[in-house]
Image (cartoon, rainbow, N blue to C red):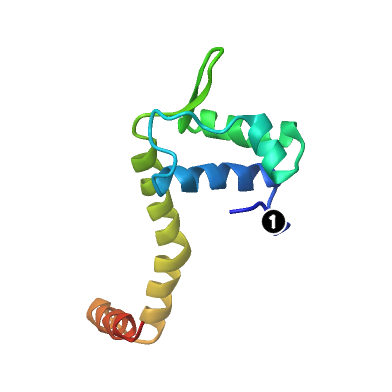
């Protein structure tokens, strides 16, 4: 996944890219994370921008530093990220869905049936 000019700060895109690698397992817990220089070179961005993304992940407890060796994925990082993304998913998609369903007079069972019907089509 490349960083793009989607209006979000590049350092957040870098952090999300690393997070996605942790979630999908391509960057397992306790493995070495890409360095700021590696990220900067790969994405052709300023190393300070890449460092900001990495530092955000350190602050969030996703990465930790081994002095003289580099950054590593923390134990429990994957589950932490999954839980945070589930929460965000609920806030961004489920809450508005429930609000709209309520306006349409639909209940949870109606929604389940609709989701099942749409799932069968894909």
> What residue occupies the far left of the structure in this picture?
109
- For disc 1, the marked residue is 4
Residue 95 visible in the picture? yes
10 Å neighbourhood of mark 1: few (<14), some, or many (≥20)? Answer: few
- Give how far across and how far down residue 37 sits, in percent: 68, 30
Res 52 → quadrant:
top right
Q: Nearer the viewer, residue 35 or 109?
A: 35
Placement of the C terminus among the 4 image quadrants: bottom left
Residue 34 horizontal side relative to residue 7, left or right: left
How many numbered callouts? 1
- Give how far across and how far down residue 17 sits, in percent: 55, 47
- Give how far across and how far down residue 101 sits, in percent: 37, 80
Residue 51 visible in the picture? no
Q: Nearer the viewer, residue 85 or 64?
A: 64
Residue 32 horizontal side relative to residue 119, left or right: right
Residue 100 horizontal side relative to residue 57, left or right: left
Residue occupying the point 41% across, 83% down: 103
Vertical side of 86 occupied by 27: above or below = above
Placement of the N terminus among the 4 image quadrants: bottom right
Vertical side of 56 occupied by 26: above or below = below
């Amino acid at each position: 996944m490349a960083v793009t000019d989607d209006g979000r700060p590049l350092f957040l895109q870098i952090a999300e890219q690393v997070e996605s690698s942790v979630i999908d397992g391509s960057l397992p817990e306790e493995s070495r994370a890409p360095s700021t220089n590696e990220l900067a070179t790969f994405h052709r961005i300023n190393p300070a921008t890449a460092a900001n993304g990495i530092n955000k992940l350190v602050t969030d407890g996703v990465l930790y530093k081994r002095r003289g060796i580099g950054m590593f994925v923390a134990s429990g990082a994957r589950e932490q990220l999954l839980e945070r993304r589930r929460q965000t998913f609920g806030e961004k998609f489920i809450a508005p869905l429930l609000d709209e369903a309520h306006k349409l007079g639909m209940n949870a069972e109606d929604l389940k049936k609709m989701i099942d019907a749409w799932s069968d089509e894909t």
